[in-house]
Amino acid sequence: MQQYFGLFVMLAIIFIVVIFNKVLFSWFKATIIVYYSIISYVFITIKNKIDRQYENITPVPDVYWDKNSGWVDSMAGYFFWPLLIILLFIYYKWFIRVQSKTAKLLVLLSLIPTATIFLFFAFMFVFAYGYRP
């Protein structure tokens, strides 16, 4: 499970953002948590199955890299597209809620570090779990 430490950190950050957000309804928060828990379980299960299938085979065949990279790329979509929609919704609600132009500017400026962190996690997910030499 040490292999999935980065995934668990990413999930923890997603859960913290969702749980402590005031614009999302409680039932929607629960739905998001269940969704990410299920896709994480499916991702880990299938990734381990792919790894076990090609374990102790040297050199590692191209078929392994194709399967693994394809699986990780598919799951990256399931992890990051919904997250992008959730973040855009939260920012939209936050932008609408603030009144002053300065506050609106600060909300827009806070998109920069958020987008950077989002892109970093998306890149690291695909790189760490689906890297093909």
Image: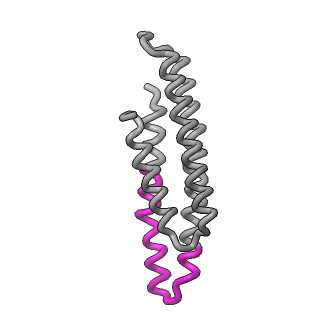
Against 57, residue 126 (above or below) is below
Name the residue: 48% across, 39% down.
Answer: 126
Image height check: is 29 above or below 106? above
Q: Residue at x 44, y 43 (%)?
A: 7
Residue 77 position by quadrant: top right
Q: Is residue 125 above or below residue 59?
A: below
Image coordinates of residue 120 in percent, x first then y, are 42, 50
Q: Nearer the viewer, residue 116 or 18?
A: 18
**Residue at left 43%, top 53%?**
12
Which x, y percent locates residue 101? Answer: 49, 87
- Depth order, front residue of 115/51: 51
Residue 103 in the magenta stretch? The answer is yes
Name the outermost residue toward the left.
2
Quadrant of the frame with the N terminus: top left
Q: Position of residue 30 (x, y in %)?
A: 59, 58
Number of marks: 0
In the rendered image, which quarter is residue 102 located in? bottom left
Magenta span: 93-120
